[in-house]
Amino acid sequence: MAGTAAAGQKRRRPPTFQHLPLNRAKKLKQSWVENQKIKSKWKAQKWKEGLLTTKSFSPASEEVGDEGHGSENKDDNRRL
């Protein structure tokens, strides 16, 4: 909970479904919230098991820092 605020990320809010009838919008919003709760619990479980890594880590960021090849990779992408 506090981890996302510390990372500087905005808290994701549920969609409002204003273009739909009120009763349908309420049901969709409730199902969205339940789905997010399930995802959050799953991610927490995987994090505790050590299977889930942080979003800030990516293999691409590791390659850019290796041996100063970061600028060469950027030039290659511009040519494509």
Image: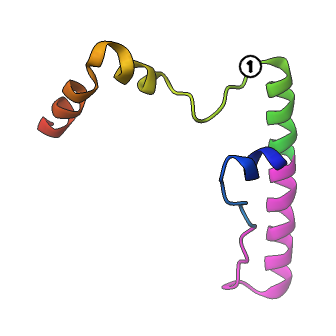
- Residue 24, how many percent across, how many down? 81, 78
| Residue at 74 percent of width and 66 percent of height | 13
- Residue 77, how many percent across, how many down? 21, 34
User: Which residue of the protein is positioned furthest toward the left in this rendering?
Assistant: 79
| Of residues 45 and 61, the one drawn nearer to the viewer in this rendering | 61
| Colour style of the rendered protein structure | rainbow
Q: Quadrant of the C terminus?
A: top left
Q: Residues within 10 Å of mark 1 (few under 14, many from 20)?
A: few
Residue 49's place in the image compared with 13, above or below, is: above
| Residue at 66 percent of width and 31 percent of height | 54
Q: What amino acid does circle 1 point to?
A: Leu
Hey, which quadrant is residue 75 in on the image?
A: top left
| Of residues 8 and 13, the one drawn nearer to the viewer in this rendering | 8
| Residue at 86 percent of width and 45 percent of height | 38
Residue 79's place in the image compared with 7, above or below, is: above
- Residue 73, how many percent across, how many down? 24, 27
Q: Which residues fall within the magenta stretch?
A: 14-37
**In magenta stretch: residue 48:** no
Count of numbered marks: 1
Residue 35 shown left or right of residue 18 in the figure = right
Residue 41's place in the image compared with 18, above or below, is: above
| Residue at 56 percent of width and 28 percent of height | 57
User: Which residue of the protein is positioned furthest toward the top in this rendering?
Assistant: 67
Hey, which quadrant is residue 51 in on the image?
A: top right
Q: Which residue is mark 1?
A: 51
- Name the magenta segment's main secondary structure: helix
Residue 62's place in the image compared with 7, above or below, is: above
Q: What SS does tag 1 mark? A: loop
- Residue 26, how many percent across, how many down? 85, 76
